[in-house]
Amino acid sequence: MSRDVRTILESLGVPTDLEPIAVGNEWRTGSGPELQVTSPIDGKPLAQFTAAAANDVTEVVTAAEESFRGWRTVPGPRRGELVRQIGNRLREQKEALATIVSLEVGKITQEALGEVQEMIDICDFAVGLSRQLYGLTIASERPSHRLMEQWHPLGPIGVITAFNFPVAVWAWNAMLAFVCGDPVIWKPSEKAPLCAMACQGIAASVIADFDDAPPALSNLIIGADRSVGEAVVDAPQLPLISATGSVPMGRAVGQRVAARLGRCLLELGGNNGMIVAPSADLELTVRSAVFAAAGTCGQRCTTLRRLIVHEKVYDEILKQLISLYGRLPIGDPTEQGVLVGPLIDGDAFESMQQALAEAKQQGGMVHFGERVTEGVPEGGLYVRPAIVEIQSEAPIVRQETFAPILYILRYRDFEEAIAIHNDVPQGLSSAVMTNDVREAERFCSPAGSDCGIVNVNVGPSGAEIGGAFGGEKETGGGRESGSDAWKNYMRRTTNTINYSSDLPLAQGIRFDV
Ligand code: NAD
């Protein structure tokens, strides 16, 4: 293990001999293949350890099931107190955890810190929520009866996460699950296992010091391939599988969970668009488009991938974008001033180049997108984000390539823009840049954007935790984080209480015996 990483992980409560399984703060060996972890910054090894195998999943599931029995009866506000303490520990460890995020997935320091801040924010949200797990009281049609809902803990939750938000997505799920009374089994991306170990180290040490928390409240199992994820998905003891990742992953997971009639929360790929109307503030538009399209090197589920521009402002927007793209500071994400870090790995680079080649074949004009080798660490895969002028009908535009490619499409009237916008299989995030209130409202209306996230004069990337996060169509339909997403992690009972000595039946039915 590299010395820097070893020191940081140790400071976060992870033992020096890396193990792929953690039941609370008890780390266990796995029986899977070796997993080599390299940094996308320079391709150098960060760590190596033996991963878990599919048959290691059962012991973790059993431990989580046992811990559920105790945790579900701990009062909600007391569960919130545990999450408050986890949030405080994250505040103390913010820089250390952000450093692991930068080293392991290549985020620039500002974005890595922002990701940890998102974890802290969801802790605060969950603490408040722990006193607000409300059910409704409903008017009963029967005299002297009360009809009411209760929300109860659901059970141990399986959480599968993608590489590109290697810490925040776990926190979105785990913190809500904890206050809702549920333990968590986390199966992180095989591309970001150290981030997962660090989070587990932090959470498990707080849990170990918390009187009424069972040790196996927070659990981790790291595989080297999809087989461990599949075993988690198939475990009937897990009533909910929350899975974040690509559409093919979601399709596989959704079908397996459906086969056992379990519940799924799917957060899958996006193909996010932004309509730029002629009345738009062009300076604001260009700034938000560049952050949304090139930030995180195009590796966000909410990355801007399609810019749908009115013909009157098309040339001006394109000119400004090309000028800014040509000057984007690309390089080591831990260096100050760098805005675009590396792609995660060689596969990401190949799929970007493949998509650009296909775009050319389909009539597209490609600006930039080439590999950058000057002024960047050797061994990392750095690219200059690409802009592609193309027809909206080109098949490549319908696909999510997880790399910084911005397709720029032209429109004439607003209805056409909405039609182009919605004509993709994914439905995560969207934006309109306009100063015309009718267009703004139209975009937010039932006949407007068909996405889960709909923004006006704000780019599609960078959501706040207070709102429900997720999207429609192939994005999977799940909602996480704020608003009432907590209901995913609980089960609802409807209670009818008769406080009379009569027995009136519903629907006025008479059944005299
Ligand atoms: P991926 O689909 O390759 O992997 C995601 C996770 O699923 C990993 O932990 C992986 O091991 C696991 N997995 C893969 N196949 C599986 C299977 N058959 N059964 C069980 N587990 C399986 O995704 P990635 O490359 O890590 O992440 C990028 C993708 O994730 C992009 O499509 C991006 O848009 C999407 N994403 C979506 C959101 C969202 O909230 N909508 C957030 C982040 C990333």
Image: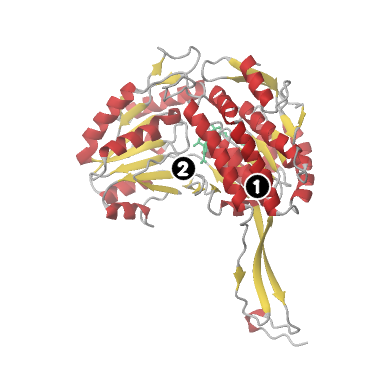
Occupied quadrant, residue 4: top right
Q: Tag 1: residue type?
A: Ala
Total label count?
Answer: 2
Mark 1, residues whose alpha carbon is within 10 Å: few (<14), some, or many (≥20)? many
Q: CA distance from mark 1 to mark 2?
A: 20 Å
Picture quarter with the N terminus: top right
* Horizontal and vertical percent position of residue 459: 38, 40
* Horizontal and vertical percent position of residue 480: 55, 47
Q: Nearer the viewer, residue 231 or 330?
A: 330
Numbered badge on residue 177: 1
Residue identifier under label 2 = 463
Query: From the viewer's perspective, is 373 left or right of 16?
Result: left
Q: Nearer the viewer, residue 349 or 83?
A: 83
Query: From the viewer's perspective, is 383 left or right of 412?
Result: right
Q: In terms of image quarters, where does ligand 1 lie?
A: top right
Asked whether residue 155 is in view, the answer is yes
Mark 2, residues whose alpha carbon is within 10 Å: few (<14), some, or many (≥20)? some
Asked whether residue 425 is in view, the answer is no
Tell me what residue is drawn at x 58 percent, y 25 percent. 100
Occupied quadrant, residue 120: top right
